[in-house]
Image (spheres, rainbow, N blue to C red):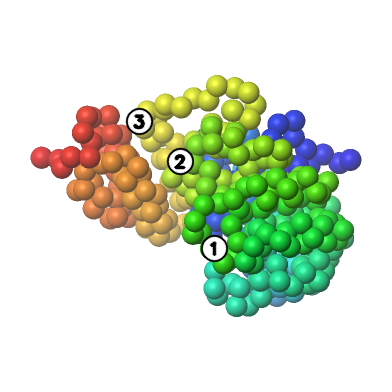
Amino acid sequence: MRKTWLCSKYPQVILAPMDGYTDPPFRRFIKQVAPRAVVFSEFLPSTQIARKPSLAEKLFRIYHDEEPVVIQLYGKDPEDFRIASVLAEEQGASGVDINMGCPAKKVVAHRHGSALMREIDLACEIVAKVKTSVRVPVSVKTRLGWEDERNLIPFVKRLVDSGLDAITIHGRTYQQKFDGNARWEPIYDLKAAVRIPVFGNGDITGHQQALEKLGTLDGVMIGRGAIDDPWLLARVCDVFMGWEPKESIPFSQKAEAWKSFARMMLEYAGVNQERQACQKFRKYLVRLHRELGLAAELRSLAVKVENYAQVVEALELFASQSEKPHAHEVLV
């Protein structure tokens, strides 16, 4: 069997595909702090790419230091998926993932994402078409079901019969969106029923919690928790390998990695796009401000950065203030 990203001695730790976040700079950042993690791209439009293949070079851009990268596609047309998957593999993708779980209303309205859970024949046709067109593993990310998990195992078994290599299950239904708590028991039941790797996803915010949720699964996928704390993936990798995780890293050290991330954003944005890239970085500064519990005045600095020098200034100020007692109090 050809070695792929699915071949691992230890349970996998995967960065979830997240629209607006898992572009190449963020993926490279994650690999910088958690080199053993596997990263997924944002969900990308198979139809748009199939109709305009020149988009592939930009949308499927993969840097050497982020490999292996799994490209996630969404859509509903099997031929579009085939074309886009071939282009993704040509650009260096280590796998192709098919989005069957996005619950966004505008996505589902077009029979994309979670809607494919209700169109099993079409979902199977998409998997089969992609599987016969690429050499890399073909996976799916989906949910427990539309309203409940009663059809989860039959649905996934059909996908496996169509050639599916692996699957990730988010522990909520389409109807739940992101409300309530993710349920992992049906994911364990699925693992017992199929022969392919099964990964669990939903509500992982700590490394010990990830270890407890792993159970019989082949790994976990982490989304929102990785945005708030990219080092979470490194700690989960450690505990999955039986190592003691490094829990306390001063923000002054983390700030250097955040600066590197900002530089990667500038590189990816291209010439004369410094302002736009730094404006995009603001959302990370705002999250850091909240996580560090800093004074309210510092938030205004975070939402105004327009160049790299200002990003560095903000991160260094965050670092200095985070080391002071009562960092949340108003500065005088």
Tell me the residue that label 1 is attached to.
Answer: 176
Q: Earlier in the sequence, mark 1 or mark 2?
A: 1
Q: Mark 1 or mark 3: which is in front?
A: 1
* Coordinates of residue 242 in the picture (x, y in percent): 63, 23
In-image side of 12 versus 179 (left or right): right
| Nearer to me, 11 or 151 | 151
| Element under disc 2 | loop
| Element under disc 3 | helix
| Nearer to me, 319 or 188 | 188
- CA separation, marks 1 and 2? 25 Å
Q: Mark 3 or mark 2: which is in front?
A: 2
Tell me the residue that label 3 is attached to.
Answer: 252
Quadrant that contains the N terminus: top right
Q: Going 67% across and 40% down the picture, which residue do you hit?
A: 219
In-image side of 133 versus 22 (left or right): right
In-image side of 22 versus 326 (left or right): right
Q: Mark 1 or mark 2: which is in front?
A: 1
- Amino acid at pointer 1: Gln
Q: Residue furthest bottom?
A: 109
- CA separation, marks 1 and 3? 39 Å
Q: Residues within 10 Å of mark 3 (few under 14, many from 20)?
A: some
Find residue 229 and name its label: 2
Q: Earlier in the sequence, mark 1 or mark 3?
A: 1
